[in-house]
Image: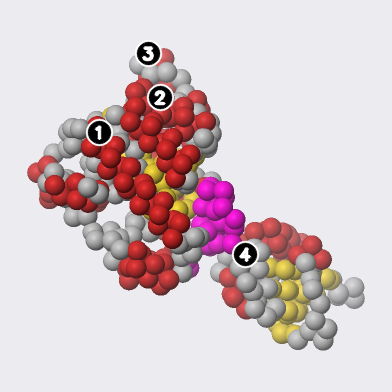
């Protein structure tokens, strides 16, 4: 019996207050093509397949993991998978984790925030966490129905609209309170849905911790050290407000795109991804990192290299107000340094002053192609430069050029 058959057999299709959507590899690949996604990471959905029988649960998870491994083998480079474990039985879960990682080649482990009341951070999970730490495992967490949920309430207000965010926050804070990430420092844990309520809850947690510790109700923990092992996906409503809040707790290199396919209609997901691509730079985030590179680093995969088209070379001739020259030069130096460091498509920015007129600035700009140039114009650092120098520039002339000699040019060859 596979996962979906088991869930239906036990009458659990609506246990999470939302029907489990249909899925097919053809539909998934079509969505990936439309959304411009090279590789997807698949995981088991909710509910957790435990119906009171540990042997049955283990068999369901084994079948799911073997099917996921076959999917990965059939479509090389298109699918990774994080294995399901038959929790709350820790012995069975540990056995399945070893089989999935060592035999099936799973790329990580998926853990529910709680398995019928057994929350992440529970001391019963210590042997499992120790093994996953030994394997330097990636753990994708996902909220499930909270223990002792009010069924009448969640039938009116779906779990996904509120309680999933609270549930994720509850589980992660429990892990922090038990110092899980510090004690098992080789775990890499993905938090879903833009960090859920963590940006709001963490300041309160930090404020309460010393008070509770002083009174003997909690143990002292290094909150920041625990947080350093967390990654965050952007599945759900990655609004500008959510991104700003997430960046108060997350490093840019730990932020990953997530789709939530097939729970959201493919056309809506494609539109949301396009909107997100246009907004990431305004928050100081590199779209290529969020959509690809950060996840590739997390899973130890090769970072795909973009193929560029015809190089764009242009000369900017700028006349700067004399009393604003020093301020302008500071802006120009900053944008040049950041662009070269963060944008692979910016091949070179070389700034020069006219010896006879120091207020006349020339900037030779070299971009990998037209798209790289357009991407550069949308970055937060370029917008800061443009807005900050608007009142400093008397005139600006842009000259597009055509190279007379085609030469290979590395990024190291040109510096501003």
- Whether residue 230 is visible to the viewer of this picture, yes or no, is no
In depth, the one of 120 and 74 nearer the eye is: 74
Q: Are marks 4 and 3 in contact (CB under 8 Å)?
A: no
Residue 401 visible in the shown view: yes
Other-residue count near label 3 (Cα within 10 Å), few / some / many at <14 / 14–19 / ≥20:
few
Q: Earlier in the sequence, mark 1 or mark 2?
A: 1
Q: Residue at x 23, y 37 (%)?
A: 56
Q: Which residue corresponds to mark 3?
A: 215
- Neighbour class for label 2 at 10 Å: few (<14), some, many (≥20)? some
Q: Which residues are magenta?
A: 277-305
Question: What residue occupies the far right of the structure in this picture?
Answer: 356
Label 4 vs 2, first from the N-terminus? 2
| Residue 355 or residue 112, whichever sits in front | 112
Residue located beneath label 2 in the image: 126
For marks 2 and 3, give the CA distance: 26 Å
The quadrant where residue 58 appears:
top left
Identify the mark at residue 305; answer none if there is no mark: 4
Instruction: Say which residue appears at 51% left-offset and 52% top-offset.
Output: 295
Q: Contact (CB < 8 A) between labels 1 and 2?
A: no
Disc 1/disc 3 C-alpha distance (Å): 44 Å
Q: Is residue 148 left or right of residue 412?
A: left
């Amino acid at each position: 019996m596979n996962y979906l058959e088991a869930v239906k057999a036990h009458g659990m299709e609506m246990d999470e207050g939302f029907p489990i959507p249909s899925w097919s590899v053809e539909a998934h690949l079509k969505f990936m093509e439309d959304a411009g996604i090279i590789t997807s990471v698949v995981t088991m959905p909710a509910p957790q397949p435990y119906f009171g029988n540990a042997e049955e649960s283990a068999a369901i998870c084994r079948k799911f993991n073997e099917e996921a491994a076959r999917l990965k083998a059939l479509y090389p480079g298109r699918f990774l998978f994080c294995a399901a474990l038959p929790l709350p039985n820790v012995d069975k879960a540990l056995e399945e984790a070893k089989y999935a990682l060592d035999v099936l080649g799973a790329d990580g482990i998926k853990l529910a925030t709680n398995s019928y009341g057994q929350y992440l951070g529970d001391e019963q999970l210590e042997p499992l966490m120790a093994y996953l730490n030994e394997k330097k495992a990636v753990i994708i967490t996902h909220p499930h129905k909270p223990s002792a949920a009010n069924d009448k309430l969640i039938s009116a207000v779906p779990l996904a609209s509120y309680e999933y965010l609270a549930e994720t926050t509850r589980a992660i804070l429990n892990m922090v309170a038990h110092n899980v990430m510090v004690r098992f420092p080789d775990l890499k844990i993905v938090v879903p849905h833009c960090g859920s309520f963590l940006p709001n809850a963490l300041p309160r947690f930090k404020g309460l911790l010393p008070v509770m510790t002083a009174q003997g109700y909690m143990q002292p923990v290094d909150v920041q050290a625990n947080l350093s092992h967390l990654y965050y996906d952007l599945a759900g409503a990655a609004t500008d407000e959510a991104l700003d809040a997430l960046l108060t707790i997350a490093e840019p290199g730990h932020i990953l795109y997530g789709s939530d396919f097939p729970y959201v209609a493919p056309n809506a997901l494609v539109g949301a991804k396009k909107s997100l691509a246009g907004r990431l730079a305004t928050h100081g985030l590199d779209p290529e990192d969020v959509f690809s590179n950060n996840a590739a680093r997390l899973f130890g995969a090769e970072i795909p290299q973009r193929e560029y088209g015809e190089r764009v070379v242009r000369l900017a001739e700028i006349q700067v107000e004399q009393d604003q020259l020093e301020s302008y030069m500071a802006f120009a130096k900053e944008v040049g340094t950041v662009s070269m460091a963060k944008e692979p498509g910016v091949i070179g920015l070389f700034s020069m002053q006219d010896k006879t007129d120091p207020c006349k600035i020339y900037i030779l700009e070299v971009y990998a192609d037209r798209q790289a140039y357009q991407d550069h114009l949308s970055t937060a650092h370029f917008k800061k430069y443009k807005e900050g120098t608007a009142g400093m520039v008397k005139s600006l002339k842009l000259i597009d050029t055509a190279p007379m000699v085609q030469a290979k040019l590395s990024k190291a060859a040109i510096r501003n």
